[in-house]
Amino acid sequence: MAFMDDFIKKNRITEVECLVPDMSGIARGKIVPAEKFLRILRDRGLRLPEAIFVQTVTGDYPDDEDVTSDENSDVYMIPDERTIRFVPWYKEPTAQVITDCVYHNGSQVDFAPRYVLKRVLKLYEERGWKPIIAPELEFFLVQINKDPDYPLVPPVGRSGRIESGRQAYGIDAVNEFDPIFEDIYDFCEAQDIDIDTLTHEAGAAQIEINFNHGDALELADQAFLFKRTAREAALRHQVYATFMAKPMQGEPGSAMHVHQSVVDLDSGRNLFANPDGSDSELFMAHLAGLQKFLPYVMPLLAPNVNSFRRLVPNSDAPINVHWGRDNRTTGLRVPVSTPEARRVENRVAGADANPYLAMAASLACGYLGMSMGLEPSDPVKGSAYRLAYSLPRHQSESLAKFTGCKPLREVLGERFIEAFTCVKEAEYQAYNRVISSWERENLLLNV
């Protein structure tokens, strides 16, 4: 912990935000004075109730969950010193650090999302493998919306006009919001968030940020922090940045594409390609694992009712788990690459997914394929939209598949499966209690 001590003293930090990613990827935790934080490092004194990990996106708790203790006992926050960074949008020198949680006896809280990703990475390590990840994260800029009954609309750009058409890859369309993106890049640089390219996506005021490839846990941390960063930068300009999977009717949804490969832990050689540049058997098995098990981990990739609105034909989003070479209509795209960069792009996850759980799920599927020696289907040529759905269509269907897959329970952990299912079932029940404006408009006087 000496590094954090030095960081805080050298930079005259006055406060520290101790962050814990919950099931939905929301940053929870505590803000403490820097002096108190340094004392906490020595005596493990910062605590949270265990139940934060079963808190729903609405702030409620499932009535019937039995994963946490009856006493709602405390868990201890253990800062990961590798994650300490500035919080660049405050005037006072402020740091943030991502924490893991343990019980009083030192054992891990095994249904904490960050631990679940660590658990999957440990399985790879035991085989002498190391996953390499590169996420791509899409989001929309929208006008501030104070009444949730009103639809979202794109913000006014520098020209004084609202973007009305779809300007995919439009440079001038991106420049409409240059002040926001300048803040995003500045904030990311201050936090060592290693973003690469920024492009305008197909939707009105829809943006995609690409991250440079690297360690899976580090990239999950960066994606988690980036969502906070984009929202904060946008708010400074009286605009919302939203990572909802499908925020606007008539516009495409927002994804979190996950590029993944596996290298040899000792040599760093990409195990997805043979010396002659052809695809390796391990790569084929990894693909097959994604094909077989992705439908079962859909709650981790499409965690909300809104998520499934994105997964429709002809919308730059997949409807099945076919794979193809440089084919963006498939759920699994294999980009044209050199052998050193051989990888698969999982295009199923939405931008609303918890990055720790989306990466854990995707890597878990690939791991099962490699460990079982599975074989994939033939690659799809042409549009995969002409082929049948093989992904769940609704949240209730996806949760039923999720709970019934024994191999995934062994990889991700029984307690995590139970805790996550309780949270998402509670959210689904809350959604079903709401009567929508569509129902009032079309059913009130017509049925």
Image: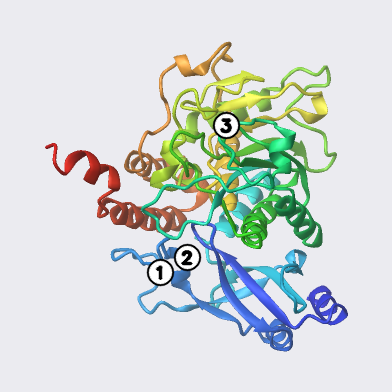
* Residue 421 place in picture, x, y as percent: 38, 53
Question: Which mark is nearer the camera, 3 or 2?
Answer: 3
Please state which of residues 260 and 306 is positioned toward the viewer in this rendering.
Answer: 306
Question: Can you tell which quarter of the image residue 398 is in?
Answer: top left
Residue at 57% across, 31% down: 165
* Residue 402 place in picture, x, y as percent: 40, 43
Sequence-wise first label, 1 or 2: 2
Give the residue number, with chain letter if any, for mark 1.
68
Q: Answer yes or no: is residue 210 visible.
A: no
Residue at 54% across, 57% down: 25
Q: Is residue 113 left or right of residue 420?
A: right
Residue at 43% across, 38% down: 249
Sequence-wise first label, 1 or 3: 1
**Disc 3 marks which amino acid?**
Gly
**Disc 1 marks which amino acid?**
Thr
The CA distance from mark 1 to mark 2 is 9 Å
Please state which of residues 23 and 140 is positioned toward the viewer in this rendering.
Answer: 140
Circle 1/circle 2 CB separation < 8 Å: yes
Residue at 78% across, 32% down: 270
Residue furthest to the right in view is 10
Give the residue number, with chain letter if any, for mark 2.
53
Q: Residues within 10 Å of mark 1 (few under 14, many from 20)?
A: some
Question: Which mark is nearer the camera, 1 or 2?
Answer: 2
Locate the C terminus and report the quarter of the image it occupies. top left
